[in-house]
């Protein structure tokens, strides 16, 4: 399944690059999403495969922080890219005559760049918040995968600020894009029903 995921996403990227008919905003977004998905599989699957091979079920603190950093970055980037793609589909279906005027390559590139910047800033905030915590013992987590909230709960220092940041960010960076996606697709469905 790991190889199928990587190869499938790689084929999407190669098809988009090689066919000039696919040089549109939708396929540019899809290529970026495929690239993020390839990177996303590299955050957990290799560690899981090593754990299966070595029969070890632990991850070090440094490995955990690194994994959290890339996992959170790629999850947030996935969410924001899906939101950009939903907007692209909204413009293509609900405003087809204005599509080329609105979704210029410049705007599409800008939306993807903003997605990257927001994701990097968010993961930097979360990583710095976790790094400020202190732990009472040598920390080894008995899993192949580290979750942010799991590490925060293992801390001996006060975690109130970390939890507030996690929940506020979840509402803003999870709820905002979800609202945008639902709004875009509700408009698409109502446009199709009107036809």
Image (cartoon, rainbow, N blue to C red):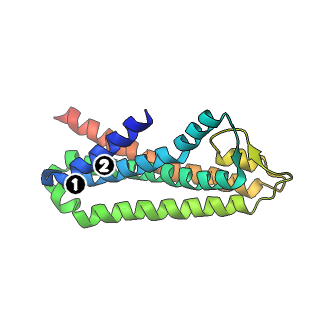
73 to 124, vertically: above or below: above
**Residue pointed to by mark 2:** 30
**Viewer-side residue, 150 vs 161:** 150
Left-right relation of 156 to 146: right
Asked which quadrant contains residue 144, the reply is top right
Identified at 22% across, 47% down, the residue is: 15
Residue 75 seen by the camera: yes
Instruction: Give the number of the disc on residue 95.
Output: none
User: Crowdedness of circle 2 by 10 Å Cα count: few (<14), some, many (20+)?
Assistant: some
Which dot, 1 or 2, sits closer to the camera?
Answer: 1
**Viewer-side residue, 116 vs 136:** 136
Left-right relation of 40 to 57: left
Spot occupied by residue 14 in the image (x, y as percentages of width and height): 25, 50
Q: Are marks 1 and 2 in contact (CB under 8 Å)?
A: no
Identified at 47% across, 44% down, the residue is: 41
Asked which quadrant contains residue 158, the reply is bottom right
Q: Secondary structure at mark 2?
A: helix
Instruction: Give the number of the disc on residue 17.
Output: 1
Spot occupied by residue 168 in the image (x, y as percentages of width and height): 62, 53
Q: Quarter holding the N terminus?
A: top left
């Amino acid at each position: 399944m790991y190889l199928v995921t990587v190869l499938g996403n790689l084929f999407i990227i190669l098809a988009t690059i090689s066919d000039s008919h696919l040089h549109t905003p939708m396929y540019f977004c899809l290529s970026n999403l495929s690239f993020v998905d390839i990177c996303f599989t590299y955050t957990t699957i290799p560690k899981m495969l090593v754990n299966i091979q070595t029969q070890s079920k632990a991850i070090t603190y440094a490995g955990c922080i690194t994994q959290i950093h890339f996992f959170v970055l790629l999850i947030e980037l996935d969410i924001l890219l899906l939101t950009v793609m939903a907007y692209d589909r909204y413009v293509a279906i609900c405003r087809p005559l204005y599509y080329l005027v609105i979704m210029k390559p410049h705007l599409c590139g800008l939306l993807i760049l903003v997605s990257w910047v927001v994701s990097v800033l968010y993961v930097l905030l979360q990583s710095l918040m976790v790094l400020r915590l202190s732990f009472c013992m040598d920390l080894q987590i008995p899993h192949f995968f580290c979750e942010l909230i799991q590490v925060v709960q293992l801390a001996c220092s006060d975690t109130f600020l970390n939890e507030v940041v996690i929940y506020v960010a979840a509402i803003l960076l999870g709820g905002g894009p979800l609202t945008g996606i639902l709004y875009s697709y509700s408009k698409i469905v109502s446009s199709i029903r009107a036809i």
